[in-house]
Image (cartoon, rainbow, N blue to C red):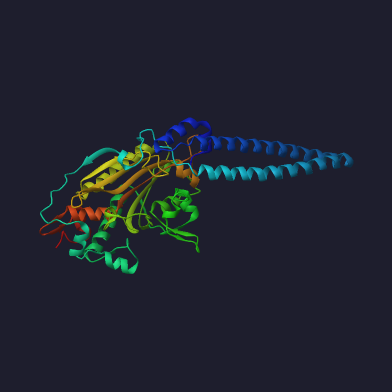
């Protein structure tokens, strides 16, 4: 959530920045400035009346002590009127604060200056590319056919049990999933991330804190009787560990990681691009979350991007890094880098990770703060990234590493799988 102070002080910059997302926020920003002025004006009136009421209370006490009861009672009538005025002003203030809060929630984060303007994925900017795209043997197959042939994933069984988008991993497929989870967690821990095993369901306050609510409410699985939501990513519970906290600046950067299943309704998704593991309702993901001060956050973002790139290097997968344009970036993000691996059998790029800096957008909702060197309380910057999302990584591993003899396992995973080839 944007800070009202920033909107008040930099309205033109915010309006101009949001144009990168294709949003004209002029009216919303102007309305917020008007509401803020009204709110501050009423609060000033309340403070003046409260100060007058406090002064009268002291004067009344002195008059009673001096035996001037009649004069004291006259002043008591004025304090009664002041209390009524303060009560009415407080009700008006609460109404304005609610309007301001609801309106500010409609504004997404302002893109970083390096973010290109654009409408969708076609306007994203390729930053770098690494790895050789493999030339597959004749008769090479996409991962959904390989999964069936090698008895790795049973999509039809998933439909029977739950529905489309809920695959069942079998035998070597299940072992490969578990191997990748452990590999990613171990790599993250070695890079200084503290491992958590968080809940898979969160309350509305947690969804609000990281920005999924109200923006992505229709995409989340909800359990209204319990007031809970199935998590779309481990980012939500892990970041909310620090909600309503004043963390110690000496501990920056605070780096956390965790594995969870993730649940997304993905309403409206259909067609060839969602076949097999390309888009699921339930999938496994290992997440990294970082918290730091504003001065260090973009250096930390670069570090996180390099870390994710290192994971793909070890998995021997060709990949590219994209800087997302304003229109394709998430609601809460100031700057996002997407990682895409190349699927040789499908002949297309598959997104496997997003690494983002949210600046103070989440921290403002979370009330996640620290004290600077002058002892002043400031909002933290929060960042997160997928390290990694498993389904499309697995799809690319199966497709790119298939040979006539079987599917070869990258060397980095062999100690985790216990096998180096699936025959």
Question: Who's the residue at 34% across and 65% down the image?
Answer: 163
Residue 29 in view, yes or no:
yes
Q: Is residue 84 above or below residue 116?
A: below
The picture places residue 411, in percent across and down from the top left corner, at 17, 53
The percent position of residue 380, horizontal first and vertical second, equals 45, 41
Residue 55 rendering spot, x and y as whole percentages:
76, 37
Observer-nearest of 237 and 348: 348
Total marks shown come to: 0
Residue sitting at 38 percent across and 40 percent down? 327
Q: Position of residue 319 (x, y in %)?
A: 23, 45
**Res. 410 in view:** no
Occupied quadrant, residue 195: bottom left
Vertical arrangement, residue 137 with respect to residue 167, above or below: above
Which residue occupies the foreground of this view, 235 or 269? Answer: 269
- Left or right: where does residue 345 sit relative to residue 138? right
Q: Quadrant of residue 161?
A: bottom left
The quarter of the picture where residue 322 lies is top left
Q: Nearer the viewer, residue 119 or 260?
A: 119
Could you tell me which quadrant the C terminus lies in? bottom left
Report whether 314 appears left or right of 198: left
């Amino acid at each position: 959530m944007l800070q009202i102070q920033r909107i008040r002080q930099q309205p033109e910059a915010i309006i101009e920045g949001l144009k990168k997302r294709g949003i004209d926020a002029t009216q919303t920003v102007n309305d917020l400035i008007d509401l803020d002025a009204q709110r501050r004006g009423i609060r000033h009136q309340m403070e003046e009346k409260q100060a007058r009421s406090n002064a009268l209370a002291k004067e009344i006490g002195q008059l009673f002590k001096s035996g001037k009861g009649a004069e004291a009672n006259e002043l008591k009538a004025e304090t009664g009127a002041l209390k009524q005025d303060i009560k009415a002003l407080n009700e008006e203030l609460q109404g304005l604060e609610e309007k301001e809060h609801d309106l500010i929630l409609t504004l997404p984060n302002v893109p970083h200056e390096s973010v290109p303007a654009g409408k969708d994925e076609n306007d994203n900017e390729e930053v770098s590319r690494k790895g050789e795209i493999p030339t597959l043997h004749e008769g090479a197959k996409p991962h959904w056919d390989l999964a069936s042939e090698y008895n790795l994933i049973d999509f039809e069984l998933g439909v029977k049990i739950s529905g489309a988008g809920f695959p069942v991993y079998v035998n070597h497929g299940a072992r490969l999933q578990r191997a990748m989870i452990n590999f990613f967690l171990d790599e993250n821990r070695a890079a200084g991330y503290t491992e958590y095993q968080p809940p898979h369901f969160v309350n509305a306050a947690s969804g609000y804190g990281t920005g999924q609510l109200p923006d992505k409410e229709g995409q989340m699985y909800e359990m209204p009787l319990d007031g809970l939501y199935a998590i779309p990513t481990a980012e939500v519970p892990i970041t909310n560990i620090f909600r309503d906290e004043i963390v110690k600046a000496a501990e920056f950067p605070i780096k956390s990681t965790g594995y969870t299943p993730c649940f997304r309704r993905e309403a409206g998704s259909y067609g060839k691009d969602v076949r097999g593991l390309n888009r699921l309702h339930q999938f496994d993901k290992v997440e990294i979350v970082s918290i730091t001060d504003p001065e260090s956050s973009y250096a930390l973002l670069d570090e996180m991007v390099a870390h994710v790139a290192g994971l793909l290097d070890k998995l021997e997968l060709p990949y590219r890094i994209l800087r997302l344009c304003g229109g394709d970036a998430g609601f809460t993000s100031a700057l996002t880098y997407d990682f895409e691996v190349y699927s040789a059998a499908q002949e297309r790029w598959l997104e496997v990770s997003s690494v983002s800096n949210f600046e103070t957008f989440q921290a403002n909702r979370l009330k996640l703060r620290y004290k600077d060197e002058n002892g002043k309380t400031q909002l933290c910057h929060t960042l997160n990234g997928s390290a990694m999302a498993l389904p499309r990584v697995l799809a690319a591993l199966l497709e790119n590493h298939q040979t006539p003899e079987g599917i070869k396992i990258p060397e980095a995973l062999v100690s985790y799988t216990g096998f180096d080839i699936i025959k």
